[in-house]
Image: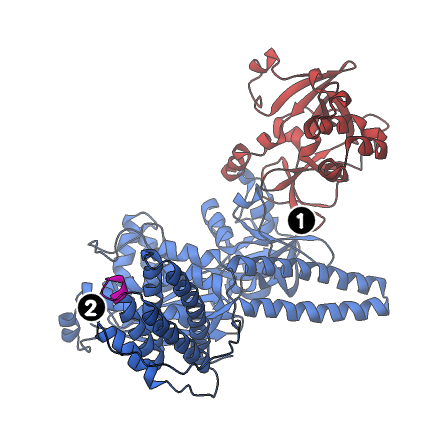
Amino acid sequence: MKSREQEYKEIFIAEALEYYDALNRLISELEKKPQDDQVLAEIFRMLHNLKANAKAIGYLQISDVSHKLETAFGLIRNKELSFSDEVVGVLFDGIDLLGELIKSIDSERQVEIDPVLIRNLDIIVDSLSDSTVELAKVQKFSTSRNLTLSDLIYIQVKKLDHLMNLVGELIIDRDRILSLSRELDNDELKSVSSHLYRITEELQYSVMDARLVSIGTLFNKFPRVVRDISTAEKKEIDLELSGQDIQIDRNILQIMTDSLLHLMRNAITHGIEKPEQRAKAGKPKAGSLQLSARSDRESVIISLSDDGKGIDIEKVKKAAVARQLVPADVADGLPDSDVYSFLFEPGFSLAKEVTEFSGRGVGLDVVKNAIDSIGGRIRIESEKGKGTSFILQLPTSIAVKGALLFEIDSIFYAIPLIHTDSVVAMDKDELHEVGEVLVADIKGETVTVVYLDELLNVAESQMRLGDKTRLKGQVQNIIIVSYNNRKLGLIVDKLYRQQDIVVKPLSKPLDSIDIYGGVTLLGTGKVCLVLDVPAITKYFVNRR
Amino acid sequence: MKDKTNKKEGPSAAEAVAARPDNSAETAVDSAKESPAKPQAVKEEMIHLIVFKLGAEEYGIKIDQVKEVTVTPNVTRMPRTPDFIKGVANIRGDIIAIMNLEERFGIRSVPLASDVNPHITYTLVIEAKEYSIGVIVREVPQSLNLSMTKIDKTPSFLQDINIHENFIEGIAKVNNRLIIVLDMYKILTQDEIRELKNN
């Protein structure tokens, strides 16, 4: 993995060279049409950007020369300097110098800046149009021009998406060939298919790698955002970033951008107290916000923690009861994690006032939906008076995911591993009929269990989810999934292996059926339906 | 599929006719559109239908809406979808929905003729604008060329039937057969999708 500095440097060089090429083109154009204001404005804009970028990353020579050129073009734009032959020569020299400086960043060679050239630039800038001062001849550095192309290319994300889809198709076919070669038991075919396996795997990782960006590309935008919000809210915030080097799929980061911004606003407006309140509570005047990222096996964990007032469990319970999400007597006994999950209900808000930045009814449900859409998870930890953390678990890549395969009523299904907690085998006698559902004690925790065959295949009017007699066999295989801080056991007929699958989205008109996240093809050529855990959980809750 | 490519790239009407004498009628349609210099090749506008049975009646779909006809592959049932969706199938790597039009339109199913194998069904892969869908039929679909003039586009009875009238493009009458010509594009529009969502 490249260091962040190296990455920034490469991006700067690529951009700067692009500006350099464009400047050369534009100034040649301007020489022919000196009156063209549009060309002039474009040159001005480019030099300005180049100056700012160079200054930000610390290439002072480049920013200095850009600044001088920018000033010169500014004068030309204001008609204070005429675009005469002499001036044109100096400007061309100046742009050439810029090019040399940019190219030298990546090489050992130091560019000697010709003092005469700098003096010439100063002369045209300082002495304005009435200048009669001689412009000295400048030694050309590049008499023979080398044409070079950039080492970096820009590519549309769309093209990478297409490439990823093709790789997905290829993996499906590869698995089919692999399974055929085993069936046919032909050694030559076996050796070719295992080679094919390795190559496609490498291809898959290369394409996935090409789509990765550092999380810093998003994180580094936050200091400014935090400053603006905290100023408006009259709060002091220390933002601490970590893990900017962690890599994640660009599209996943794109989808998470608004959600993180939303959580950030929430933390500042609702989480962190005003300085005077903090002082009373014995906390430092400035609130602390920590935005961090780390890798965890196949996922990336992003967490946002504040040291604010924390979530008032009782208030959430009251609001949930008021909105009839839960009966009052049940609410009292709920574990904290279940109570927090109410925060993700549409329109649920504890904010009393609407501010510029939050409390407009756009709630955490939007964040939750965004995370669901990419197959991630979100969790809240909070302690009253101490602070709140939002912990997001996101997949590193969209297309390929680990999944658990199983069978119900002779149909193959898969559930993405990110939603599975554990798998247990349990005797029928350990399942209990409580109310309209089955419950089981799983590792000391009482978990609702649902027979998937009943949930999926029995006519809705005859569905009896709390009836043990519907179960087949004595020992039940249960997959424990978790969604929105609550666990649910899914009883399946047969449990198979764990496998990396390529999820193909369902095409129309089936894409509107939300209990399926997509489909995949198994090595045998059989279609396997991928269940969407959030939607199945919701379907189950609504059924009950 | 082959027909389509030839249609677009066929060097001349004459050559195409020579290459595929069995399909001369269709080629004539093309020459009418593409080479007005040879109007003598055209007598009347023709239409090419894929004809199949639903219930006791014969239905037709214009060939350019049909991507392929295949023996129905293994269909994986999808729980919690409407009954007329039989499931999904893998057709050349694409996973498409398979539907039963008899159930979709509430057409009464009739017993099969004795010479039809009850274990094999056929799937017409219909290509709509954004996606494909499979339509199951029980007997081998046939291909039929007929003159456009044989199609009654606005039979008066269409006002009398209460549903699906938008889906019916016209009624073809050939040799004492009555063929209901469907517009699959319309069948696969918003209505269909809404119906699934409400389920």
Q: In the rendering, at what x and y percent does residue A169 appear? A: 66, 57
User: For this rendering, which residue is in front, A33 or A208?
Assistant: A33
Q: Amino acid at mark 2?
A: Glu
For disc 1, the marked residue is B94
Q: Which chain is blue?
A: A
Chain B rendering hue: red
For disc 2, the marked residue is A273
User: For this rendering, which residue is in front, A32 or B98?
Assistant: A32
Check the residue under mark 2 and report the chain it is in.
A
Determine whether, in the image, residue B47 is placed left or right of residue A95.
right
The magenta segment is: A75-82
- Kindly tell me whether residue A389 is visible in this rendering: no
In which image quadrant can residue B67 be found? Answer: top right
Q: Amino acid at mark 1?
A: Asp
From the viewer's perspective, is the residue at label 1 or at label 2 nearer? Answer: 1
Residue that extends furthest to the top in the rendered view of this protein? B156
Where disc 2 sits, the SS reads loop
